[in-house]
Amino acid sequence: MTRKHLGCALSCLFLVACSDEDEDVVSEPEALSEENGVTNMELIARGQYLAQNVTGCSDCHTPRGPMGVLLMDQYLGGVDCWVRLDDGACLPTRNLTNHETGLMNRTDEEIKRMIRDGIRPAASGDEPLFPQMPYYTFHNLTERDLDSIVAYLRTVPGVDHAVPRRSPEFDPPQAATPLDLNAVPQPPEGSAERDAAVRGRYLAAEIGACIICHSPRDLASPTVLDYTTFFTGNEVFDVGLPVMSRAGNITSDTETGIGDWALEDIVTVLKEGKDKTGNGICPPMFGLFAGMTDQDAHDVAAYIQSLAPLPGLAEDQCVFPPM
């Protein structure tokens, strides 16, 4: 089985309905409205920021060229075969652009339900999305952030790309269970950076790509994520490089994790895609969080640094660009 970025989306991301073409049900999109003193432009800006720098939408929903480079002329236009099984069965990622082959004919509520609950409308009735799309994590988006992402997706230039329906092997019997926030590690009480870490928890663990890509997953399990091994790595990504990229252990374990990294080292890997030795981190991590604000990068780093040590499952041998 070849697995492409069986994690993100980072995540996306994320965001956004990893599944099928919607050729069978057409709905009228809703107009944006101002409420609670938040303008449409503010919503769109927030949604763009989240989609591009937190949820990792583009990583899963934009085709890649040589060396894993995103093809920006097809930005969020969907991928025909994001996951390919040995028998040729494919799981696509859907077109998220403002085109009739994308989300143009979906209502805001339908888009939000796909993102948050993993349910899409179809002629035969509601269908669950395959949990490659991390809706079980995006379920924890605040209502404003969810509205912001939808508002942003309405502005994405249309890409004419009718994504094929997923293979039957990827038809799940039901939607995955939303991530239980009570199971997600909390920053220790009294720690020096606790306020920052609490803010970072929302970005990295409650809605972000960190917990999705860096936690072992069982896509057949109702919860998808293994609640006992959060952030210990081992997810594999095929992004068109000579070697497979693998998500590392980002807990504070000193042998298999990043327990000897300073907070500034974690910020550097987020913003610059380089590890503490100066080596580039392979896609999808490379460049994914480059646009994150300094404050958010600091907060995410503070949360990651607060994680208790857990042994990792594998070591990433991928260096970018390849030697």
Image (cartoon, grey):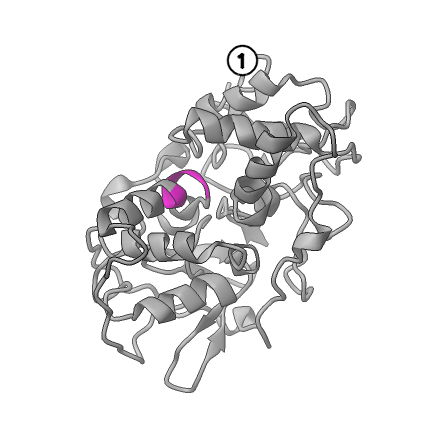
Quick check: 80 above or below 48? below
- In which quadrant of the rendered view does residue 115 lie? bottom left
Residue 74 drawn at (x, y percent) = 26, 47
**Going 29% across and 58% down the picture, which residue do you hit?**
35
Residue 131 visible in the displayed image: yes
Residue 104 drawn at (x, y percent) = 23, 65
Q: Nearer the viewer, residue 281 or 302?
A: 302
Q: Nearer the viewer, residue 288 or 139?
A: 139
Is residue 53 on the magenta stretch? yes
Q: Give the range drawn in magenta.
A: 50-54
**Going 54% across and 17% down the picture, which residue do you hit?**
279
In the rendered image, the residue lying farthest to the top is 277
Quick check: 192 above or below 89? above
Q: In the drawing, does residue 89 fall left or right of residue 122?
A: right
Q: Which of 296 and 59 is in front in this view?
A: 296
- In which quadrant of the rendered view does residue 210 lie? top right
Magenta stretch secondary structure, dominant: helix
Quick check: 133 above or below 11? below
Q: In which quarter of the image is the N terminus?
A: bottom right
Name the kind of residue labelled 1 in the image: Gly
Residue 156 visible in the displayed image: no
**Going 34% across and 39% down the picture, which residue do you hit?**
70
Q: In the drawing, does residue 42 fall left or right of residue 215?
A: left
Is residue 6 on the magenta stretch? no
Q: In the drawing, does residue 283 fall left or right of residue 230?
A: left
Residue 289 drawn at (x, y percent) = 44, 32
Residue 265 drawn at (x, y percent) = 58, 18
Quick check: 77 above or below 59? below
Q: Is mark 1 on a helix, strand or loop?
A: loop
> To which residue does mark 1 refer?
278
